[in-house]
Image: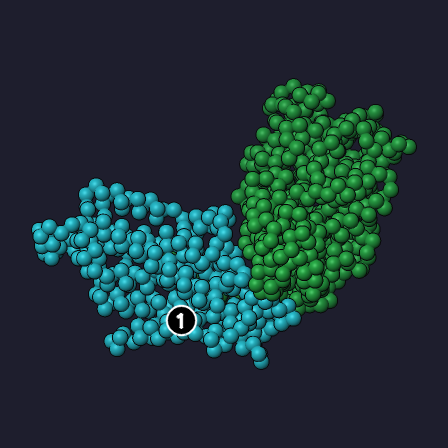
Amino acid sequence: MRRHPLALAGGVLLVLIAGFCFLGPLVYPTNQTDVDLVNAALPPGPGFPLGTDTNGFDVLGRLMAGGQVSLQIGLLAALFATTIGTIYGAVAGLAGGVVDAFLMRLVDVMLSIPFLFFVLILSARFHANAVTLALVIGCFSWLLSARLVRGEVLTLRVREFVLAAKVMGASRSRVILTHLIPNALGVIIVNVTFQVADAILVVSALGFLGFGLTYPAADWGSQLASGVTYISADYWWLVYPVGGCIILTVLALNLLADALRDAIGRPTSVRS
Amino acid sequence: MRGRLSLALVALLAASACAGGGAPAKDIAKEPPKQTGTPKDGGTAVVALTPGLSPNYIYPYPPAAANGTVIARGQLWRSLYRPSGEGDQVADAALSLAEPPTYSADRKTVTIKMKDYQWSTGKPVTADDVVFSVALLKAALAKSPANWSFYTPGQFPDGLTATASAPDTLTLRLETAYNPSYLMSMLTLLYVMPSAEWNIARDGGPHLDFTQPKNAGAIYDYLTGESSDQSTFATNPLWQVVNGPYKLKSFDPTTGSFSLVPNTSYSGPGEKRLDQVDFKAFTSASAVLNQFKAGNLTVGTLDSSFISQIEALKAKGYNVYGGPAPARFDSLTINFKHTVDGFDKVIAQPYIRQALQRLIDQKGYVAGRGIYNGAGSVNYSTAGSGSPYPPAFGDNPPYPYDPAAAQKLLTDHGWKVVPDGATTCEQPSLCGVGIEQGQKISFTIASANTPEYVGARDVAFVSAAKKLGIEVKLVTKSLNYMYANYGNSFAPAKANEWAMQDYGPLYLAAGYPSGNTVFNTEGSFNLGSYASADADKLIEASTFGADEKALSAEVTALATDLPVLFFPTPHTLVVWKNTLSGPDASFRALLSFLYSPEQWYFHS
C-alpha cells in the first residue's frame, strides 16, 4: 500500500464511505419512511445539514440509506457474477477443445445482448427489489469474469504443478478447485472490485431511468434521478451530494482495483 | 460498460450544473393575455407534443390492436362538432362543421344542418360524409368493441341511423333518446371523412355502397391497412383529402414528429396565416423545457413540476399561464377485481375507501414543494374544477384529509390498527363480507414513471397509509406499459398485477363530464371493474334523461362512493412565444390539447 498512495487513498475512501453508510445512521438517525410535506425540499440548514428532498426526507440520512442498498447490491452482484464466471471460465479453460469453443461462443452471444435494454424490459414486467436487481446484474456481469478466468486457466493448466496433480490422479473438479482457482485468485479479486463498481453504476443508471427501487427503499440512482428533475428549481442539494457519493465510491473501487492489479502484476483486465 | 456509464453520469452532473432557475413562482396568470399585435403573414410555429405520446396512426379511428395515437387529431379531419375546451360548453359552435342540432319532442330525431365547408378537393362537406363516418365507426365496432374507447355496448352508435335527407341536412334517428349534451359530446368524437374518395376497398377499386355493413367493413379494413404504413402518411393520396385547416406535409415515423401546411380550401374561421406548423414529439417534459429555454419551440404545455421556470420562460420571451384543464381529474384508479391478499374483499367495503381517501392530504399536496409546488387545485369529483355540474357537497368534501377519522373508521369496523405495523381485522362480523380474522390491508400501486408529481403524490399516500398499518407497495411502470396492460376491460389477465394505479390525469368531455364508459359497469374504459347499480342508474339518467341536473347527481354519487381515490388536480402550464397571438380561447383550449393554429399569427 505504501508503494501505492492512490490505492491507499482508495481503500481509505471506501472504508469511510462504508462507515458513512452503515455506521452513519447510528450516529445520525433519521426517519426515512414518513413523508413530511411541511419540510419538503428545504435547503441545507439547521436540523437538515444537507437539506431535505421533495418528500421531506433528510438528504443526509437518505444518502446513508441509499448507500447501504447500492453497496449491498454492488457486492452481491459482484459475488454472484464472480462465482458463476470463475467456475464457468475454469471449466472452459481446463476442458479446451470443442467444449471451450462452445462455452466461449455462448459467452460471446450473451455479450451481444444490450444489457440496459434487456434489464429495462425485465423491469417493465417484474417488480425490482435489492436481491432481484443484484441477481439480474450478476447474470450479465459473469461473462467478463468467465473470459478472464478462462484466460488465466489456459496459462495455468500447462504449468508443472497442474500436470503433476493430473498425473497423480486428481479429478477435474479437484484440479479446478484446489489448483486453478486459488492460483487465479489474484485476477478474480481484482475483477470483483471492478464488478462492484460496475454494479453500483448499473444500479444508479437503472434508478436514473426510473426503474430502480421504489419507496420506502432508496438507492443513489433513484435519488439522483429525482433530484435532477428539480435542479432547474435550484434544488442543488438533491443532485450534487448523491452524485458525489456515486463518483467517490466508484473512484475508490477503481483505485483499489488498479492497485491490486498492479500488485498482482497482471495485464489490464479484459473489459468492454 | 463502466467507462460509458461513468461518462454518462459525469455528463449528467455537468448538464445539471449548467441548469439554473429562479425561486418558485406563485403568481401564475389564470388567463392568457388578450389577442394582440398586427398580424403578419408567414412563419413556422413549432409546437411541442405531449411528452411520451408520439403519433403513429393517421386514420381517425385506430383499431385497438394498433395501440394507435392519431396524428394531428382535428387538424386534418374535423369532427362534426369541435370540442370546446371550455368547461361550460361541450362544443365550439364557431369551429364546428354543422349548425347546432335541433331535436324532435321525444329527442329521438335529431336534425343537423351542415355549414358551408369544403374538402381539400373543392367538393362540399355533405351530410353523406357524416353518414359514411357513422357507417365506418359501426364497422370498427362490429370487428371489436375495443376499437373505440368511448363505446358502451348498446349505446352510441348502436341504435343510431344516420341519413342524408338533403346534401346539407343530416337526420339522426335514435332508438333511445339521449341527453342532448351527452349526444353532443359523442358527436364531438365523430370525425367526418370523405365518402366520395374513401369508399373503396382496394387501390383503384370500385366505389362501394357504404351503407351496406359488409362494404363498410371492407372499406374499414382497407383504410386501417393503409394507415398501418407510416412511411406513406404524407404521400398517400387518401390522406391528402381533408376537411380540416391543414394537410400533412411530412411525418417522421422514428420520432412521431410531423409538419402541417394550410389546406387552402378550408373555409372555416381562421386566416391560416402561418406557412407551416411543426409538431415535435418528446419523450420527457424536461426535454420540452430545455427546448423552450433554447428558444426552439413556439407553443407547448408543461406540467406543474416546472412552475419555478415561469419567470425564466417569460424572460425568454414566452407568455405563460396555467390552470386546471376542464373536466380533468387525477386519481388512484382502484382495481375491484384484484384478488391478491384478499384486496377485492377489503376494497369492496365503502368505509375502507373512505378511510383511504382521508389519508390524502390534498391541500398539503398542492402546497408541497415536491409535489404540486402551489400549482394545483383541490378536487374531490369526476367533474373537475369549475364544472357547471359540481357535486352537491360544494366545497365541503365528504372525506377530507383526516388520518384520525380514517383510524376511527377502521377501529369502528372491527380492525386493530397498528401504526407503522400491520393493521388486521379482529372482528370479521364488523369488517365486512368475505373478510376473515387476521386479514391485513396490503396492496400494490402501479405508479407512472412520468411526470414527476405522480410518483411524489403516490409516495406521500403510501407513507400516510403506513402510519395506519396499511402496507402499500409502490411499483414504477412506464406509461405505455400501463396503458397497454392495466385495464380489466381490455387486459383482464393482468388484473392481479395492480390493485391501484396512478397514470396521471383522466379527461372527461369538457362541458358535460359524464362518467359513462368510465364508471358504468359495462363501460369500455372501466379500468378497475367498478360496479354499482346505483351509479349505473344515475349514469343512465345523465346519459339518456333530459334533465342535465342528473349529471350533478351522478358526480355527487361517484364522489361519495369513491370508485377511485381523488388526488388534487395539478395545473397545466401553457407556454407560447409572445410574438405569436390569436384568439384567447385558442390558447385556453391548449389545456385540453386542442390546437387551432389556423387562428394564430406572428406579429412584430
- Residue A248: image quadrant is bottom left
Residue matched to label 1: A18
Image height of B178 relative to B551, above or below: above
**Colour green maps to chain:** B
Task: Specify the subunit that label 1 lies on.
Answer: A
**Colour cyan maps to chain:** A
| A40 or B38, nearer to the observer | A40
Q: Residue at x 83, y 25 (%)?
A: B166
User: Mark 1: which amino acid?
Assistant: Ala
Residue B452: where, in percent of width, then height?
60, 59
**For the C terminus of chain A, which image quadrant?**
bottom left
| A271 or A98, nearer to the observer | A98
**For the N terminus of chain A, which image quadrant?**
bottom left
**Label 1's element?**
helix
- Residue B540: image quadrant is top right
Left or right, A63 with respect to A182, comes to right
Q: Residue at x 27, y 46 (%)?
A: A104
Question: Among all residues in the image, which is located at the extreme bottom?
Answer: A46
Q: Residue at x 27, y 50 (%)?
A: A88
Mark 1 residue crowding within 10 angstroms, few (<14) / some (14–19) / many (20+): some
Residue B331: where, in percent of width, then height?
67, 53
Q: Residue at x 34, y 66 (%)?
A: A254
Residue B110: where, in percent of width, then height?
84, 32
Left or right, A143 with respect to B19, comes to left
Left or right, A180 with respect to B264, comes to left
> Residue A29: in sight, yes or no?
yes
| A5 or B504, nearer to the observer | B504
| B586 or B529, nearer to the observer | B529
